[in-house]
Amino acid sequence: MQPASAARALLALLVLAPDVQSARAGDRPRAALCAGRYADTLAVMRADARTREARPAADWVYCLRATAVYEQLSYGKGGRLRRLYHRKVRHGTGFAYRKDGARWLVATNDHVTEFPEVTGEGVDLDGVPPGARKVREEVRIVSSEAEPDGPDQPVLAPVVADERLDLAVLASSRPLHLMPYAFGRSAELRVGNAVLARGYPLGAFPAANSGKVIGVGQRDLERGWDHEDFAVDALLNLGSSGSPVFAVSCENGEPELVGVYHAGYRGAQGLNVVVAVDQLRRMLDELRVAPAARAVAPEPAADPAALRAALAAGPIAFPFGGRVVRVARTGDGLRYELLDPGFPLSGRIHATVLDGERGDAATGAAADLRAALRTQLALVLAYRAAEAQLPAGGARGTLERLAVRIRERQEEQSDLLAALDAGAPGLADASATTHAGGSGKGAEASGSTP
């Protein structure tokens, strides 16, 4: 046996060894180890399953390589268009769970396989500059991160994905080994239950990690997710995302799938979260995204009349492209004042945009700036309304989604402010600096000049 193979075999044995010792001790009755649906130790695992799980690799768990190619456009000497390409690669874990006609289905995390269409505007991708567009992507099965791409590797086709659940299902036209265990019931997990995860930490090699359930019923609203997690203390790493997580049934000693590992807390390797399987079953079975349990908050309307009515109590300030804008009603419209970068120390007004007093004929950059100000104001007003409902039982998820939308617009807003500062066509009249309360230049978003 090669040293690397011996090390992997030893690792797998060490995962199960503590529970083997407790089983041999025989000083605790089986009932004490199985107070509910799932056991508090892997020692109650039946013999054939134990033999299978003592192997270094599970032949139905796969290392996935997701690759995306991005195109970046720029201009060279003489105005020549340049095209630069950037390749982004990540590794994760997937597991084949059933056959569907002539294809074999593989489940993993959505964040393992998903790449943004365009970088920038709040979407950062290491090694890929902002403003690049995705032109190609694929997911394939490899033996490890060290294996180069080759023609014999199965390439997986996307079937369905749900960002909220952080779940993606892919399909292989080539036969794959399937998970030999049944789906379990994550709702019946309790703190102290033993769990076993199979995956490819760092994409390096197949590994088994065991631990305990240390928390249940945790709602996860990070990064646009919306699902229920349970926490485990198993030592999982990057590359383990998408790993199947099992608990041992007290009824028959068989491992059952109770979740899919998807994230860990930074700086706390033994604190990892698993998406509970109960909410994944419908998508895994029906291969379609289930409707949300509650409606996702629609984009707030940016109607000028509604915005003007919302400002009846007086002006408000809101963030815009890393700066502060103050808005107030004026006549039958709105007056947006871009405050100096030194605000609140400085009281100067950098530029003014009037909206709605002279018709609705804005074009080009002036129309873009007006629309961006309206949209941002509508989002901020919606956020504050949702925030006011929290003490009365309002949905925190709505607040989180609105905050994400506000952050996503910052780069576009920064570009508009840069164009404003540069005196770009259509915005030159808004580029003058005036004192607070002064009557200097301003630009009307309606397209006419004062």
Image: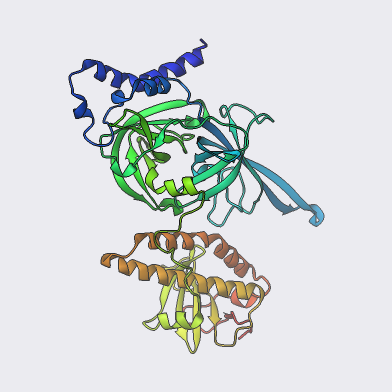
Q: Quadrant of residue 113?
A: top right
Q: Quadrant of residue 232?
A: top left
Q: Nearer the viewer, residue 121 or 340?
A: 121
Residue 162: x and y, percent? 49, 51
Q: Is residue 365 above or below residue 328?
A: above
Q: Residue furthest top?
A: 1
Q: Residue at x 49, y 43 (%)?
A: 109
Residue 151: x and y, percent? 69, 30
Q: Nearer the viewer, residue 253 or 124?
A: 253
Q: Nearer the viewer, residue 37 or 310?
A: 37
Q: Quadrant of the C terminus?
A: bottom right
Q: Is residue 166 above or below residue 55?
A: below
Q: Residue furthest front?
A: 101
Q: Is residue 145 above or below residue 27?
A: below
Q: Is residue 132 left or right of residue 98?
A: right
Q: Is residue 114 left or right of residue 236?
A: right
Q: Residue at x 59, y 76 (%)?
A: 430
Residue 34: x and y, percent? 23, 31
Q: How is the image coloured?
A: rainbow
